[in-house]
């Protein structure tokens, strides 16, 4: 039980940043990878400490039921990704400089991630997300190939504009609260805003929400603001795709949720839910159709991230304890399963020397462990039982049908189409005659650093979907009440 | 006492059927010959043929399996049981409670399957051809039959043959158009089931037109005798069925004494004779149709039966 | 439901209480004037064809932004705003324009801006956007300070115009310019709100990003436009042609 | 009892986990399948006990479950009945698997999981657990269908299979969601308490029918079934065909007859009746066209599922018309036929497996004359075929008798439309039955009778003892169930009570099945005895009159040349082929229903080429349902792809457009 002045959140944020500095100094591969793992592990341990941390805001940070699980999950995935990257980085063929940049950017990203989730001050949250964006730009561009640069540039410009709009939204939030808060600093505190929102000016709140939605929605990859996501996830180092779709999207959606909580707290505002539902549904449908035309495996799963974010957005758009719980489950489950997929896919891509779906075939026959692991992970992402996404999609669909059945038609269609596409890709990659391996296959032990995290994630997704420990379930239930 | 009399009636009935079977075939042939201006063989000729066949040793193909030997008995037994369920001169026989029309259809299917399997056993072209056609025709005959059964079920409220017959006799149903339609449909089915003209010609051995005979090409001796007897039995069964359902008049009611039985017997013989005559006339009047026109023939029967049912719905105002 | 005027209590150290500012009062008029000036310059940006002229306009906008920030700092008695003003002046009025000129020379882009949407239409669109901005700000109850409210309308218009510029210009430099004027609008909004905390930090952070974009233009030698970068570089690598 | 049930399922899951390391072990297969055998037998015993002693009223909350609440386990009559079915079939299949020897290691873990999924579906007492088990079952069986994934068509089959399974899930979840929406809970007790009505009920009916129908392979959602069942190993095909499809029907019955409450209107039966009749006809007809044993059997499965669905529909209709006894009759028909079909179809699929083992092929045109070399298999298969052809006194006929009686009573629903539908359904059912008989004769005649059609077929040999026993077990059950259907129906009394909510005596006595009013009855045992009696007497008489032993001679066939020396088993071309046997039906019905085509290519005189005869057919669901959907999907995706080629600037404009649009929307909303 930490003392009230004990700034655990800040420690959680600054440990990775300190690590980033250390890693920027480390030129050699093995030690860098190990240090990277060590830092991530420390981060995870600290994050676990949040469970015992008293709730509520503490200066610029806050700890509550909504962000605790997200932070813990973020650091968990950070650790597993670090482990995976230890095995995978050898194949990336970095020179010393890129290696430093890669590891440094990774930890920088982790820290920013944590700050974005833990921030109570909306301004701080904005800054954190911007830092995360810059870090991810760095990580995506690190290869320096034209394609990578293009992807990074796209990410940079689109998300940059999004970030700018989010800042305007933040300013509007303060404008709304400004007449009501005495001391200036509170004007951006989520807690304060949430408290006083009911007396704020609805007009300003509406405006604020629009800008925050468009701004952070860009980061969350909601259609039609999604364009940066597929290229960014497909062109960066393989390990990065896992954290991008596993963490960055969550942080952005979390920010949108905070905004929704504030705006929703005012009875007079234009209901924010429908906006979220609209964008979410657009994401689900567009992704469901786009999935059918992908040839590049990583782009394929990037699109699947868009679809899942859309589902979560729809859930939060409906709001209410049940739908929010479904959305939260979906976020968590998606992070776990999707990063698991990227681990397996990354290793497969390195084995086969290509990330084209056509080039990755017959994994089950040539590499049974990897093949079945990847197959199960993809099945989990497709929403098949017994993993978390099945539970969340079940809850979401039943809730939507019960509340407003007509929404369930496009929703069910999208889910169905997407799942079918995933089944097809799964079979293309895992079944059939094996495709030839690349000459420079990764070391044997790299398979361990792939399958370990992969199965760990699947196991956790299984627990999350089917046997969540009571306290955690209570925590999620509490979290589901926060966005309103 | 009643049980005993029922039992006696049943046994009498079975013997009567066994005796009648060859006669029905023989008489029909004889009548046909007469109608065609030939003298024709004596009505007892079938009996003589069977006796001769029984004396001969059966010859089986080298690769014939146990099916070839078992099928004749199985088929005959099924037909025997089936015909034991169709009331002839008296009602309320011992096996009457078993006499369910659906079961009857089932037993006939057993006989048909036995025949078809025997036809395919040796693996010859004709056997297969005959079996395929036989089974295919059933696909049209069965529904027609079932729809007729539906008609009875609506009128008599049951599918038990005995009860249907009773209802038909003194149910005061009068003359109904749907009954007439059903009768026509059932006649068509009977013709098809017994491989009579115009569906099949029992007398021909022109391979390409054969259905029934094609399956018997490989059987000889007692097996052939059994097959022949079985087909005769089946013909008798169908005629008896038609009589029992559509012309149940004069049949001795359940639990009645020997006198009524005699009367019923006479009535039955009369009716059966008439029916044989009608069959002979019909067969010598029409020509055999091409094999693949049979479905149309049976399809027409099916439609008639459906029409009968629909009319029944309307007329009896069940709706 | 009108908010209480709790926030409207004048702070002791401020010359003009910042609760009931209305037309005809000096602080308001000046702020309004500066904001209007920025909006005007945004239109200038849209209107100019020659890249050099555009950059001049941008520099002026930066300068006015600095002035506005300083003025707000004076009005709100918020010294940190002076810092913001200083940063804005240095970076936006001086450094970045210089850098952009350098870029033009480096990438020899001495030619008229290619527009995806003609100058005339883009001006009209700009007007429409301003109208929209006013329309959406209008329902904000007058209880919130009139100054803030007007500033919001102006800032919003500047932001929208900047974005409009980004999407109607095919030239990388001009798109950067659009991004910058967007960011100017943000800062204008930020300084416009009384007592906005973290103004300095936020504006700096936003600035950092713009600087990085400019750097990107340099590093990646983005000659013509995002379009070509997008298509030309990437198609061969993407393997996604249907 | 529930604890025991949970235990059984847990054991199965444990077996699945244990199968991963054991897969490489040489005896691993035997161990795992032996475990499955015991577990399934245990489940069957449990179900039997539940049916005899009356199912436990309690509901058990599992220690695990979704984050929003515990998962509930229960065992009522309905689940117990299907659990019994599952147990019996699973036992037979597992036994066969032991005998068949170890398959590929990857096929081992999914098998217990498959069983566990089905058991879970049956034992579930809330919608989530039910669908969890349902999808688990699909997933595991998909892995089994895909186990031989080197074959392209197997992959295609697996894909189609899983997609249909997803469709089933995507329809059932909203169906339960609609119920839960106005009941306010997902557990069955709550759902039962608040039955839907009006359009809501209609939607539940439609969704349930599509969802369960997609999994049960009802027309027009049957395309996957004839592809998927043959792709799996035989014992798995047996499970899929015998048990899994029944589980889907269980879900249908649970949803429509139980959870939706007894107050549903009488027209509810019509869709089920129509779908069932269509399935029965199409399946039976296709079974006559196919020339792969397992595909043929799969099509016959479609037919039988059609029968069961018809019976369920009749039960709904009668119940809606307050004809309690008739509803019970129809429900009894459904249950009885489900059980019987499960058993004899398992038998037939296992026999198909044995044939594949012994004779090395599944194609009718490469087999023949197996009765000589595989006598036991032939005997067992004969029982199965006779049952599938619904011959008295075997089990197939009993269920069909009840169904036909129910159909023949359809006119008692006082509604002319329904009466006509019922009459048409009667005709279709009869036709389907006759077609099934034809298909079965074709199957048996081509596979076991005649002469070998290929060298491999000529070298066939009988399968191992265990496999033979695994055939004889269901064969014995088929006979037993055929002789004592009355007992089974009486055993199902609580289920009937539950399904029809009519306190009516089940339409059966120990020895007989009776119609609702008992006006007509079917005494299978008596029929069997009389047949036996007649047979015995016949043999005695005939053999007395003709004592001569049979003698063997060459085939006659109106003149038959000796086979060439290089074809010791005779010239296959002189035998009827699968296509030849199918010809009459192909011409009579195939052209109309299956777009069947025949073309004869007759070379000109002097041309040495042989004449070619080609016959083909296409299932209507493919051009009418699947192809258009695929085309639609492609069109949509093509349109959507245009967005992808956008440049950054275009994408920016998209975002800008969104922003402006939202602002305009906002302004408009606030103006109002």
Image (tube, grey):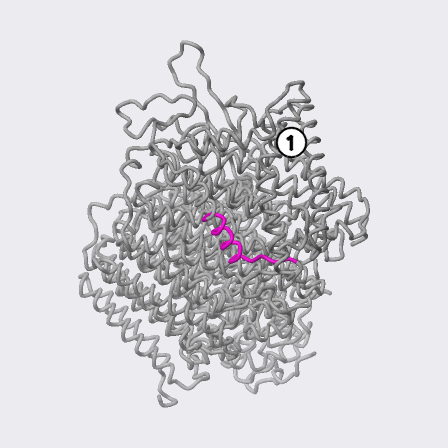
Q: Nearer the viewer, residue D643 or C60?
A: D643
Asked if B175 appears above or below A214 in the picture, the reply is: above
Image x and y of residue A375, in percent: 35, 56
Mark 1, other Cα within 10 Å: few <14 / some 14–19 / many ≥20: few
Nearer to me, C211 or D647:
D647
Residue assigned mark 1: B296
Which residue does the image show at 61% across and 72% down from the upper left? D192
Residue appearing at x 24%, y 72% in the figure: A38
Residue in front for this viewpoint, A426 or D360? D360
In-front residue for pair A310/D278: D278
Q: Which residues fall within the magenta stretch?
A: D520-536
Asked whether B115 falls inside the magenta stretch, the response is no
- Percent x, y of residue A417: 50, 52
Q: Look at the magenta stretch and give its main secondary structure.
A: helix
Residue B4 visible from this viewpoint: yes
Q: Quadrant of the N terminus of chain B?
A: bottom right
Identify the chain of the residue marked 1, using the numbered disc in the image. B
Residue A101 is drawn in which quadrant?
bottom left
- Residue D370: x and y in percent read 34, 40
Q: Is residue D61 left or right of residue A23?
A: right
Q: Is residue D535 magenta?
A: yes
Q: Quadrant of residue A397?
A: bottom right
**D414 sits left or right of C113 in the view:** right
């Amino acid at each position: 039980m930490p003392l009230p002045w004990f700034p655990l959140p800040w420690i959680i944020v600054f440990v990775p940043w300190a690590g980033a500095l250390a890693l920027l100094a480390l030129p050699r591969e093995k030690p860098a990878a190990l240090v990277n793992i060590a830092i991530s592990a420390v981060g995870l341990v600290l994050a676990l400490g949040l469970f015992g941390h008293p709730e509520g805001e503490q200066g610029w940070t806050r700890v509550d039921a909504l962000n605790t699980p997200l932070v813990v999950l973020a650091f968990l995935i950070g650790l597993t990704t670090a482990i995976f990257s230890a095995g995978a980085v050898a194949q990336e063929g970095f020179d010393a400089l890129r290696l430093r940049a890669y590891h440094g950017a990774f930890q920088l990203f982790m820290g920013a991630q944590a700050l974005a989730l833990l921030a109570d001050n909306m301004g701080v949250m904005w800054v954190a997300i911007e830092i995360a964006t810059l870090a991810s730009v760095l990580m995506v561009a690190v290869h320096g190939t034209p394609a990578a640069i293009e992807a990074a540039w796209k990410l940079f410009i689109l998300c940059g504009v999004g970030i700018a709009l989010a800042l305007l939204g933040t300013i509007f939030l303060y404008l709304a609260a400004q007449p009501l808060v005495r001391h200036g600093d509170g004007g951006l505190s989520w807690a304060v805003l949430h408290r006083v929102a009911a007396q704020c000016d609805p007009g300003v709140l509406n405006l604020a929400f629009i800008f925050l939605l468009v701004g952070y929605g860009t980061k969350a990859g909601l259609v039609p603001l999604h364009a940066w996501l597929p290229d960014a996830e497909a062109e960066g180092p393989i390990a990065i795709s896992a954290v991008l779709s596993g963490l960055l999207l969550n942080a952005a959606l979390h920010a949108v949720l905070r905004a929704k909580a504030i705006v929703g707290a005012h009875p007079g505002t234009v209901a924010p839910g429908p906006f979220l539902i609209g964008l979410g549904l657009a994401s689900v449908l567009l992704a469901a159709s786009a999935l059918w035309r992908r040839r590049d495996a990583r782009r394929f799963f990037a699109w699947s991230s868009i679809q899942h974010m859309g589902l979560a957005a729809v859930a939060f758009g409906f709001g209410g304890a049940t739908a929010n719980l479904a959305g939260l489950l979906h976020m968590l489950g998606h992070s776990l399963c999707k990063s698991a997929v990227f681990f397996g896919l990354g290793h497969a891509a390195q084995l086969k020397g290509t990330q084209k779906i056509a080039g990755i075939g017959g994994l089950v026959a040539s590499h049974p462990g990897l093949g079945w692991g990847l197959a199960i992970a993809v099945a989990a992402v497709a929403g098949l039982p017994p993993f978390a996404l099945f539970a969340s999609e079940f809850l979401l669909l039943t809730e939507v049908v019960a509340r407003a059945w007509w929404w369930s038609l496009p929703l069910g269609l999208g889910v169905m189409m997407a799942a079918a596409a995933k089944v097809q890709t799964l079979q293309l990659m895992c079944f059939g005659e094996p495709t030839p391996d690349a000459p420079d296959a990764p070391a044997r032990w790299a398979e361990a650093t792939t399958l370990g995290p992969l199965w760990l994630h699947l196991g956790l997704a299984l627990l999350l979907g089917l046997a969540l420990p009571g306290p955690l379930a209570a925590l999620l239930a509490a979290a589901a009440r926060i966005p309103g | 006492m009643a049980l005993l009399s029922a039992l006696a009636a049943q046994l009498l009935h079975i013997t009567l059927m066994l005796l009648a079977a060859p006669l029905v075939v023989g008489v029909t042939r004889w009548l046909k010959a007469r109608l065609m201006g030939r003298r024709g063989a004596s009505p007892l000729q079938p009996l003589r043929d069977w006796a001769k066949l029984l004396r001969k040793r059966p010859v089986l193909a080298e690769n014939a399996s146990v099916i070839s030997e078992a099928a004749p008995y199985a088929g005959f037994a099924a037909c025997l049981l089936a015909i034991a369920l169709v009331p002839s001169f008296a009602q309320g026989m011992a096996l009457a409670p078993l006499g369910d029309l659906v079961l009857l259809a089932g037993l006939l299917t057993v006989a048909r399957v036995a025949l078809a399997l025997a036809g395919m056993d040796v693996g010859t072209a004709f056997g297969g051809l005959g079996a395929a056609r036989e089974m295919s025709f059933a696909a049209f005959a069965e529904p027609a039959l079932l729809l007729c059964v539906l008609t009875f079920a609506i009128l008599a409220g049951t599918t038990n043959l005995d009860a249907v017959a009773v209802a038909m006799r003194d149910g005061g149903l009068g003359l109904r158009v749907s009954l007439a339609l059903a009768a026509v449909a059932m006649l068509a089915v009977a013709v098809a089931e017994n491989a009579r003209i115009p569906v099949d010609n029992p007398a021909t051995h022109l391979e390409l037109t054969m259905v029934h005979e094609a399956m018997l090409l490989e059987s000889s001796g007692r097996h052939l005798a059994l097959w022949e007897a079985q087909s005769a039995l089946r013909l008798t069964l169908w005629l008896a069925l038609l009589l029992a359902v559509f012309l149940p008049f004069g049949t001795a009611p359940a639990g009645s004494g020997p006198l009524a039985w005699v009367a019923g017997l006479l009535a039955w013989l009369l009716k059966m004779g008439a029916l044989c005559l009608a069959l002979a006339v019909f067969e010598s009047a029409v020509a055999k149709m091409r094999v693949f026109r049979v479905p149309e023939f049976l399809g027409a029967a099916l439609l008639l039966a459906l029409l009968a049912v629909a009319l029944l719905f309307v007329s009896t105002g069940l709706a | 439901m009108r908010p209480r005027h709790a926030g409207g209590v004048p702070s002791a150290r401020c010359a003009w209480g910042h609760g009931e500012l209305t037309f005809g009062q000096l602080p308001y008029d000046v702020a309004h004037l500066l904001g209007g000036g920025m909006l005007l310059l945004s239109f200038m940006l849209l209107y100019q064809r020659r890249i050099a002229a555009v950059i001049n306009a941008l520099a002026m906008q930066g300068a006015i932004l600095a002035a506005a920030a300083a003025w707000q700092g004076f009005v709100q008695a918020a010294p940190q705003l002076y810092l913001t003003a200083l940063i804005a002046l240095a970076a936006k009025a001086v450094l970045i324009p210089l850098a952009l000129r350098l870029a033009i020379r480096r990438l020899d882009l001495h030619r008229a801006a290619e527009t995806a949407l003609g100058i005339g239409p883009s001006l009209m669109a700009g007007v429409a956007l301003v109208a929209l901005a006013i329309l959406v700000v209008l329902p904000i109850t007058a209880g919130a300070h009139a100054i803030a409210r007007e500033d919001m309308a102006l800032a919003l218009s500047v932001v929208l115009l900047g974005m409009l510029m980004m999407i109607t210009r095919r030239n990388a430099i001009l798109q950067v310019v659009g991004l910058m004027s967007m960011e100017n609008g943000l800062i204008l909004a930020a300084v416009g709100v009384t007592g906005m905390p973290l103004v300095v930090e936020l504006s700096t952070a936003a600035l950092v990003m713009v600087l990085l974009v400019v750097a990107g233009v340099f590093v990646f030698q983005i000659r013509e436009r995002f379009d070509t970068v997008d298509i030309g570089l990437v198609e061969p690598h993407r393997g996604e042609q249907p | 009892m529930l604890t025991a049930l949970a235990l059984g399922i847990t054991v199965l899951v444990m077996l699945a986990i244990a199968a991963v390391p054991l897969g490489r072990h040489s005896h691993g297969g035997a161990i795992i399948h032996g475990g499955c055998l015991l577990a399934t037998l245990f489940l069957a015993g449990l179900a039997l006990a539940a049916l005899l002693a009356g199912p436990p009223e309690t509901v058990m909350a599992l220690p695990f479950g979704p984050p929003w609440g515990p998962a509930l386990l229960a065992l009522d009559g309905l689940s117990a009945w299907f659990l019994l079915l599952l147990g019996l079939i699973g036992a037979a299949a597992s036994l066969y698997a032991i005998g068949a020897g170890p398959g590929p290691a990857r096929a081992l873990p999914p098998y217990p999981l498959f069983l566990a999924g089905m058991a879970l579906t049956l034992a579930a007492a809330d919608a989530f657990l039910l669908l969890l088990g349902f999808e688990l079952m699909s997933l595991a069986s998909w892995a089994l269908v895909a186990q031989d994934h080197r074959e392209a068509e197997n992959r295609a089959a697996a894909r189609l299979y899983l997609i249909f399974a997803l469709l089933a899930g995507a329809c059932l979840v909203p169906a339960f969601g609609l119920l839960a929406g106005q009941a306010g809970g997902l557990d069955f007790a709550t759902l039962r308490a608040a039955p839907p009505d009006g359009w809501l009920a209609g939607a539940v009916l439609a969704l349930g029918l599509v969802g369960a129908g997609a999994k049960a392979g009802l027309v027009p959602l049957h395309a996957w079934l004839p592809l998927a069942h043959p792709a799996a190993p035989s014992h798995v095909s047996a499970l899929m065909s015998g048990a899994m499809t029944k589980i889907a029907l269980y879900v249908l019955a649970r949803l429509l007859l139980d959870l939706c409450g007894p107050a549903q209107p009488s027209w509810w039966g019509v869709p089920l009746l129509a779908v069932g009749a269509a399935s029965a006809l199409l399946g039976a007809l296709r079974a006559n066209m196919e020339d792969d044993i397992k595909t043929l059997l799969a099509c016959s499965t479609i037919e039988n599922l059609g029968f069961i669905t018809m019976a369920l529909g009749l039960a709904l209709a009668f119940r809606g018309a307050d004809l309690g006894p008739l509803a019970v009759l129809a429900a009894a028909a459904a249950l009885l036929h489900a059980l019987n079909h499960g058993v004899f179809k398992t038998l037939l699929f296992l026999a198909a497996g044995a044939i594949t083992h012994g004779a090395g092929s599944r194609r009718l045109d490469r087999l023949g004359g197996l009765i000589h070399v595989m006598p036991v298999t032939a005997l067992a298969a004969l029982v199965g075929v006779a049952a599938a052809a619904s011959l008295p006194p075997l089990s197939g006929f009993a269920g069909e008798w009840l169904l036909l009686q129910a159909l023949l009573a359809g006119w008692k629903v006082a509604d002319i439309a329904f009466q006509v539908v019922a009459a048409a359904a009667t005709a279709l059912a009869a036709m389907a039955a006759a077609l099934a008989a034809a298909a079965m004769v074709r199957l048996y005649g081509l596979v076991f009778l005649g002469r070998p059609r290929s060298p491999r077929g000529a070298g066939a040999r009988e399968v191992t003892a265990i496999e033979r026993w695994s055939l004889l077990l269901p064969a014995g059950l088929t006979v037993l169930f055929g002789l004592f259907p009355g007992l089974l129906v009486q055993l199902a009394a609580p289920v009937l009570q539950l399904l029809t909510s009519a306190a009516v005596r089940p339409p059966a006595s120990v020895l007989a099945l009776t119609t609702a009013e008992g006006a007509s009855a079917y005494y299978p045992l008596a029929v069997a005895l009389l047949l036996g009696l007649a047979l015995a007497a016949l043999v005695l008489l005939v053999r007395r009159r003709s004592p001569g032993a049979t003698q063997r001679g060459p085939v006659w066939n109106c003149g038959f040349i000796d086979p060439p020396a290089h074809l010791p088993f005779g010239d296959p071309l002189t035998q009827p082929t699968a296509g030849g046997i199918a010809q009459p039906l192909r011409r009579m019905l195939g052209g109309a229903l299956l777009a069947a085509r025949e073309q004869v290519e007759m070379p000109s005189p002097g041309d040495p080429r042989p004449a070619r005869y080609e016959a083909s057919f296409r299932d209507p669901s493919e051009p009418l349902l699947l192809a258009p959907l695929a085309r639609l999907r492609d069109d949509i995706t093509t349109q959507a792809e245009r967005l992808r080629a956008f440049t950054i600037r275009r994408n920016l404009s998209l975002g800008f457009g969104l922003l402006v649009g939202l602002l305009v929307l906002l302004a408009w909303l606030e103006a109002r």
